[in-house]
Amino acid sequence: MGFRDCLCAMIDNSLEDRNDDETWPRFAVGFSLTGVEPPSQDHVAMQHALKQSARAPGIAGRDTIQARPMRALLAAWTLAVGLSAAEPRAVSMHPFAGQRGVAFHATLRGSNLKATKTVVVEPAGISITVESAEPEKPSDQVKPGMDLVRVRVESTPNTQPGRYTLRLVTPEGISNALPLHLTDSPVIAEAVDVHDTPETAVAVVTAPALYSGRIARRGESDLYAFDVRAGQTMTFQVTSGLPSIGAAGGNANGFDPSISIYEPAGSWFDAKRLNRLAFNDEPLWVLGRLTDAYLVHRFPKSGRYYMRIEAFSGQGGPDYSYQLKIAPGTVPQDTAPGKTDWDERGYQRKLNANRLNELSERGGRPQNQKSIESYGTPAAFSLPGTLEGTIGAPGESYRSKFHLDGPQDIAIEVETPDAAPPLFNPVVRLLDAKGEEVVTNFLVGRGACTGAMTKGLTAKAILPLRNPGDYTVEVRNLTSDEGNAAFRYRVQVRPQVPHIGNIQIAEDHINLVRGGAKTTRVTFDREEDYRGAVAVTVENLPEGVSALAAADYEPDTDPPPTPGKRERYVARTERMVLAFTAAESALPSDQPMTAVVTVRPLLDGKLGAVIARKQIPVMIIVAKP
């Protein structure tokens, strides 16, 4: 946990027991610090003022929030934020899964949703009708300020099953997106009552089966009872409706479900005692990936068993919905569709034979490069070339040579088609004719807290080779005690091609007050010394809305404490700002229009092909007095 997170936690805790009159200031500070809804760049200065003026010496050396200074700042905060705090924000949907061709009812929960009129779904094919929208009644499990929107979800038998996204449309604008799953199989609703004991467990009659449930309060767990035959294998998967993403320091947000399998055992102290046989929180915890639970278990004995679902850290609440899938045999885990955006440095991107032309397109250059040949595990290969192999047994390593006729800037990229880090950690070393190491795919750094040296593997390294001669590429696993058929690698050695790498367009949706403006950042990486320009255009804007190039303030940051040659492993990241403005005469929107932001390289006076595109719903709203 960094200083920013520690400060936020301290502020939240210091106000936990204060009265309702002081709850709003705590929410405002928590909102701006914790990042539940990241603030726009227009709010940075006011956030800084809030954080600086909100601290005062407290009891027993702790810092607390003084309510009076906070109230004094609220007027300034309101002026700075405008209507952004009143934008509709969708938090959860329950149930979020249903069978195609079968209508079902669901409840959407969030803030500033009580005026919801319509719900839009992407891609098309599902119709959602709003039946009611009202404030949620506060309780010991529910804080005030939330709204409930009850809807009817309809589809046809021909609607494509899969994952959809929905947004709510209100007079205050359009909300963020929520997931909606459409399945081929019937979805059984969990019983409303508590069922956390063998006597109250939900009975699974047949498998395969899909259940829709919810961990409605802290400490709650749901128990399911099922019968199996001796030697039978079963697959259990829980998908969270409030997705939790693996993050440094733990999963601070979202619902991280876990699965436990039990058998009736009994003991002298408790005849109903259950003995745990298996547990899964997620198959593999990886930064940036979902933490849904998945478990395959073989039962050696016939009989009745129990499966328990709970939040990993004991959380719970009205937003903790889940979908449970139970199937006989071994069934692969259902995963979210992979990102279609360009992935420059991911281990599972595709390093195909047309790589040089793909990079040339992203650099605004002609696509007339030669195809890259693939090699097995030869003694020698030619540049550009892709080495393919498998670390099939512990301790295996492979070496291949290439000859360099003259100085050349090269790039070494690594792909792991099957197992990827942290399971398979390929180490690639480049050796010169004397056997001395020239470069490897290790990035060396120093920890921010202790300054201790750290090392990490990377999927790409670039360097200039100035000495002609023979070079050797060595590939092995990080540890010499592991190796199997899934440890496949593809190592591509090629000349550098200056280009634009990863691109991020920040906004998910934009609600503009007439006469107002909002900014969004477009962040991009300059790869392999790309020195051209980057052109960003916005199309299909509502009438009266324009997009302008802008600049905002970004505080200086200390350079990373890296003793190694960081430029070999990390791209140069830059950003630009788009300012969306709405004229005073612009008409308010009844429905969102989808603006399209595109990014292209601009080199030598020529505009290149579109290399990134993002659709952003835009609405014009009227400021309330």
Image (tube, rainbow, N blue to C red):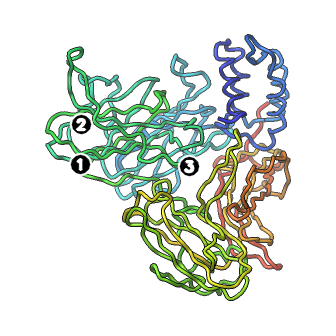
| Relative image position of residue 153 (x, y in whole percent) | 43, 44
Which residue matches tag 2?
A: 204
Front residue (pair 228, 269):
269
**Residue visible at 22% across and 31% down?**
263
Q: What is the quadrant of the C terminus in the image?
A: top right
| Above or below, 234 relative to 136 | below
Which residue matches tag 3?
A: 288
Label 3 close to label 1 by CB (< 8 Å): no
The kind of residue on which mark 2 rests is Val
**Residue visible at 47% across and 53% down?**
336
Front residue (pair 619, 446):
446
Which residue matches tag 1?
A: 328
Which of the 4 image quadrants contains residue 56? top right
| Relative image position of residue 234 (x, y in whole percent) | 25, 46
Q: Earlier in the sequence, mark 3 or mark 1?
A: 3
At mark 1, the secondary structure is strand
For marks 3 and 2, give the one nearer the viewer: 3
Which of the 4 image quadrants contains residue 418? bottom left
Query: Left of 603 or right of it: where is 27?
Result: left
Find the distance from the CA under tag 2 to the CA under tag 1. Answer: 12 Å
Query: Left of 228 or right of it: where is 224?
Result: right
**Residue visible at 53% across and 37% down?**
254
For marks 2 and 1, give the one nearer the viewer: 1
Find the distance from the CA under tag 3 to the CA under tag 2. Answer: 33 Å
